[in-house]
Amino acid sequence: MAGSLGTLTTHVLNTGMGVPAANVALVLYRQDSSTNAWTLITSGTTNDDGRCPGLITKEQFTAGVYKLHFETAQYWASMGETSFYPYVEIVFTINDPEQKYHVPLLLSRFSYSTYRGS
Amino acid sequence: MAAAVSSPLTTHVLNTGDGIPASKMAVTLHRLDSELKIWNMLGVGTTNEDGRCSGLISQEAFTSGMYKLRFETGSYWESRGQTSFFPYVEVVFTITDPGQRFHLPLLMSQFSYSTYRGS
């Protein structure tokens, strides 16, 4: 059977400055359901539009608990700014890998938010 | 000197999906041991009817460092018979000046959350 139809994407936005957050290093992990250890799936960097295509292949995208780790302090530091958060981690559950999941990060130096989007 | 000084670090959890404070949610506070690189749990509490959790840490214990607030949001939604996209929420932050007050709210629904450094 072919891989899932579902996808996982992210989008990092710098809400403090009203721009996409480019060159943010990020890592996607999946939790091993028996050991609870985190397995690295992909590491990447956001592009000029704050996106990171190719986070996970359809074959890899199975049901489970995932974690997106964003190197946000590194991002702010590269612009000479401090930040309240050294990094942001978002842990989420994928029950149906046939669906599309969009997990954005809206980020300022002293706040952030995320949601399940499409 | 006033007695019962409130914690220098406070939180407030709001259920934005239902428009109510999130009560009876377990919250733990941890600090990173910078040498061993492990998290030490400092305090545990449960949010009250107003979604607040007091006494997470004393002023004396509140030193500079990297902290983590972990909110058992998945258990909260489960207790309400609702599902959630996030099994829990962890907010990691850096304290460089423990003389200040830090208010870290969590505004959350089943499929979204936000946090900010407040006062």
Image (cartoon, coloured by chain):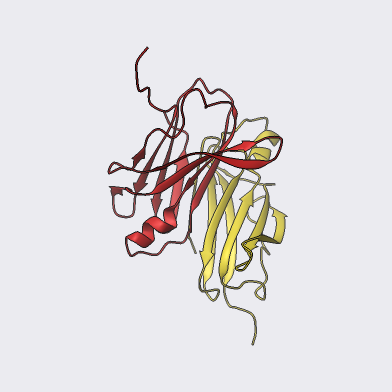
Chain colours: A yellow, B red
- Residue drawn at x 60%, y 57% is A67
- Residue drawn at x 38%, y 55% is B76
Front-lying residue, A25 or A52: A25
Front-lying residue, B40 or A109: B40
Tag count: 0
Image height of A111 relative to A70, above or below: above
Quadrant for the N terminus of chain A in the image: bottom right
Question: Taking the image as drawn, is residue A13 in sight?
Answer: yes
Front-lying residue, A13 or B40: B40
- Residue drawn at x 46%, y 42% is B115
Question: Taking the image as drawn, is residue A50 in sight?
Answer: no
> Which residue sits furthest top?
B1
> Which residue sits furthest bottom?
A1
Residue A104 located left or right of residue B33: left
Residue A32 % position (x, y): 63, 66
Residue A84 % position (x, y): 56, 34
Residue A4 falls in which quadrant of the image? bottom right
Residue B94 % position (x, y): 58, 33
Image height of B67 relative to A49, above or below: above
Image height of A80 relative to A48, above or below: above
- Residue drawn at x 55%, y 53% is A90
Residue A48 % position (x, y): 67, 50
